[in-house]
Image: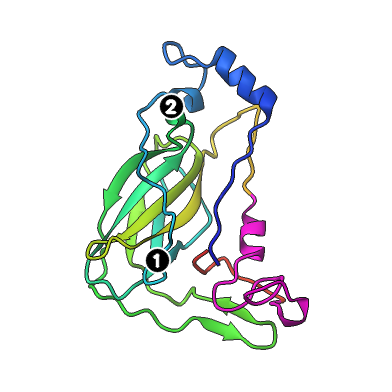
Amino acid sequence: MRQKLLLTVCFTVFLATQAYGSCSAPQNAIEAENCNTGSNSWAVNNPDSTIQGFASDISYNAGDTVNFKISTPATAYHISILRMGYYQGNGARLITTISPSAKLPQTQPACLSDTSTNLVDCGNWAVSASWTIPTTAVSGIYFADIVRNDTGGANQVFFVVRNDSSHSDVLFQTADESWEAYNGYGGHSLYGSNAFDLTNRAYKVSYNRPF
C-alpha cells in the first residue's frame, strides 16, 4: 500500500509562525532548525516495489541507533536521511547519506504470517543498515529515502525522533497507528486486502513492515 503523509497545520499557528518566526533570534530549537537550508529533491512520487523497507522501531530518542531492514535485489543502493520541516517551504532537510552495511544483494526471508488473523510480520528480516542519531538531533518526523544506484528506483522509510529530556509546552503526536491500520503490505490491512473489504481483512497488523 502506498500512502503519502500529510501534515495539516492550523491556520492560526501558520499566522503565528509568519508573525513571530525569526532566524535572527529563534525562540526554540524547532524554529532554529527550520532556518537551515532545506532540500527540494526528496519526494518519491512513484514508489518502487523492488526496494522496500522499514525501521526496527517507529520512535527513537536522540542518541539511539536506527536499524533499517530493507528488501531489494539491488547490488548497490544508498540511504538519504532527512528531517521533515518547513525549511523555506522545501518540506525537508537532508541530514546525512549512508550506505548499507549488509553484503549485497541481501536476500530477506519471507515475512512471518498468521492465517488465523491475516497478520504479516517482517521482523525476521535482517538488518541492512544502521544510523546513530546525533544527540543534538532536533525532534520531529524523519524519513529515509532508499534509492537504487542502478535504476534510481526509490521508496521511503518513516520514523520519529524524540527528545526525552525536553519539557516543551506543545507535543505533536504522529498518527502511526492509523498508518499501520491502513497499511496493506503483505496482503491485508485492518480494512481489507487491496480494497475496502471487511470480510477479508486483517485482525492484527504489525509495525514490522514497509508502508
Amino acid beneath label 1: Asp
Magenta-tinted stretch: 175-202
Q: Provide the residue designation for mark 1.
A: 48
The label number, if any, that marks residue 180 in the structure image: none
Q: Is residue 18 above or below residue 42?
A: above
Height in image: 21 above or below 126? Answer: above
Q: Position of residue 60 (x, y in %)?
A: 49, 50
Question: Is 74 located above or below residue 97 in the figure?
Answer: below
Q: Is residue 157 above or below residue 140?
A: below
Q: Residue at x 54, y 35 (%)?
A: 165
Q: Name the residue at 55% across, 72% down.
A: 185
Q: Give the residue at x 62% y 47%.
A: 174
Horizontal relation, residue 19 to residue 190: left or right: left
For label 2, the crowd category at 10 Å Cα-Cα, with few meaning under 14, some 14 to 19 and many 20 or more, is few
Q: Secondary structure at mark 1?
A: loop
Could you tell me residue 164's position as x and y percent? Answer: 55, 39
Percent coordinates x, y for residue 182 in the rendering: 65, 64
Front-most of residues 39 and 174: 39
Disc 2: which residue: 88
Amino acid type, residue under disc 2 in the picture: Gln
Query: In the figure, is residue 54 to the left or right of 103?
Result: right
Instruction: Mark 2 or mark 1: name the one nearer the start of the chain.
Output: 1
Quarter of the image with the N terminus is bottom right
